[in-house]
Image (tube, rainbow, N blue to C red):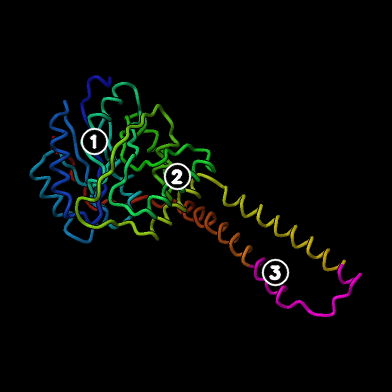
């Protein structure tokens, strides 16, 4: 099917406890879709929400036949919920967007324009990030730049999940079934012609963010361990450096004892050295454990998610 005759566009929306924002989100997305030729669908994924999110989704589906609902059996996390939505999306082009309206749906027509011009991936890069703390913006900037330096995959900086994928890019992405998923890295890994558009990221429309610093730290670990072995190399280099320093220090102690004598036991310095080397060893074991734990989970071959209910769009 040619890009000039778009027959379907899918909007994939993972949601967890988003009952306050979904009605406004649906209103703004519907307004955008009303101006797009051809049938479209909005794929809501309920990621085991504990509030009234699933009921709100059903109410919105009664108002808008373009809405389909994927109700997961429990909370699997955003990356997995997003994967479920992509698996069920039927569009020739698929847009991924969060429900909190920090990413404006009004950019979708511009994404479609670049897709028709030949881009398989159109991703939205944040030029301004409203409603976020200085600490969060600074650490995010540092993370993306560090990952770009140590990884073989060129993950775009200051870019979230908000993007458009062609059917060709989506089918390639669906082949990647790893359990520990860092979707921003997977989007970049598949390659294909890509186009960036810039936008101002708004504050959350309603509700509260589900990402605290602990969860963001876990996501950062997923990014590093999924796309680079640099932490293992760092552990190796630090271990080699400490071993060499310890060897040189031992030579110095032998020299000092033979030629000058050293009748006073150096208990404080000995404890510092022992604790330092022990700390380095524990850090190295922790890094190895992160990779080993991920290998263990991959070998289980469990399904990524389980669907409790699926209601397709009525168009």
First reached walking from the N terminus: tag 3 or tag 2: 2
Q: Position of residue 302 (x, y in %)?
A: 40, 52
Q: Is residue 291 a member of the stretch shown in magenta? A: no
Q: Extreme left residue here?
A: 63
Figure quadrant of residue 150: top right
CA gap between label 1 and label 3 equals 59 Å
Q: Position of residue 216 (x, y in %)?
A: 39, 55
Decide: few, some or many residues near mark 2? Use Cα within 10 Å; few <14, some 14-19, many ≥20: some
Name the residue rendered at 34%, 22% in the picture. 118
Name the side, left or right, on which 102 lies relative to 277: left
Figure quadrant of residue 265: bottom right
Q: Which residue is mark 3?
A: 273
Which quadrant does the N terminus fall into?
A: top left
Q: Which residue is mark 2?
A: 144
Which disc, if any, is residue 222? none
Q: Is residue 269 a member of the stretch shown in magenta? A: yes
Residue stretch rendered in magenta on the structure: 256-278
Q: Which residue is mark 1?
A: 10
């Amino acid at each position: 099917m040619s890009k000039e005759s778009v027959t379907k566009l899918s909007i994939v929306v993972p949601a967890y406890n988003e009952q306050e924002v979904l009605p406004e989100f649906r209103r703004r997305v519907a307004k955008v879709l009303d101006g797009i030729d051809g049938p479209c669908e909005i794929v809501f994924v309920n990621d085991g929400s504990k509030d009234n999110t699933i009921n709100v989704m059903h109410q919105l589906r009664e108002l808008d036949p373009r809405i389909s609902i994927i109700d997961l059996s429990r909370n699997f996390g955003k990356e997995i919920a997003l994967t479920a939505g992509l698996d069920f999306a039927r569009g020739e082009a698929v847009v991924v967007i969060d429900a909190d309206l920090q990413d404006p749906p009004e950019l979708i027509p511009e994404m479609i324009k670049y897709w028709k011009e030949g881009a398989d991936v159109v991703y939205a890069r944040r030029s301004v990030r409203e409603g976020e703390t200085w600490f969060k913006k600074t650490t995010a900037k540092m993370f993306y730049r560090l990952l770009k330096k140590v990884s073989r995959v060129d993950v775009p900086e200051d870019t979230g999940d908000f993007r458009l994928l062609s059917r060709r890019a989506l089918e390639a992405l669906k082949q990647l079934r790893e359990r520990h998923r860092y979707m921003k890295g997977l989007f970049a890994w598949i390659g294909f012609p890509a186009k960036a558009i810039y936008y101002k990221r708004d504050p959350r429309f309603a509700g509260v963010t589900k990402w605290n610093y602990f969860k963001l730290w876990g996501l950062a670990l997923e990014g590093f361990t999924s796309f680079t072995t640099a932490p293992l190399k760092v552990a190796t280099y630090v271990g080699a450096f400490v071993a060499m320093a310890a060897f040189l220090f031992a030579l110095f102690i032998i020299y000092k004892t033979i030629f000058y004598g050293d009748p006073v036991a150096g208990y404080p310095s000995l404890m510092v050295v022992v604790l330092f080397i022990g700390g380095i060893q524990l850090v190295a074991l922790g890094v190895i454990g992160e990779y080993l734990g991920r290998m263990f989970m991959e070998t289980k071959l469990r399904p990524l998610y389980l669907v409790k209910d699926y209601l397709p769009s009525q168009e």
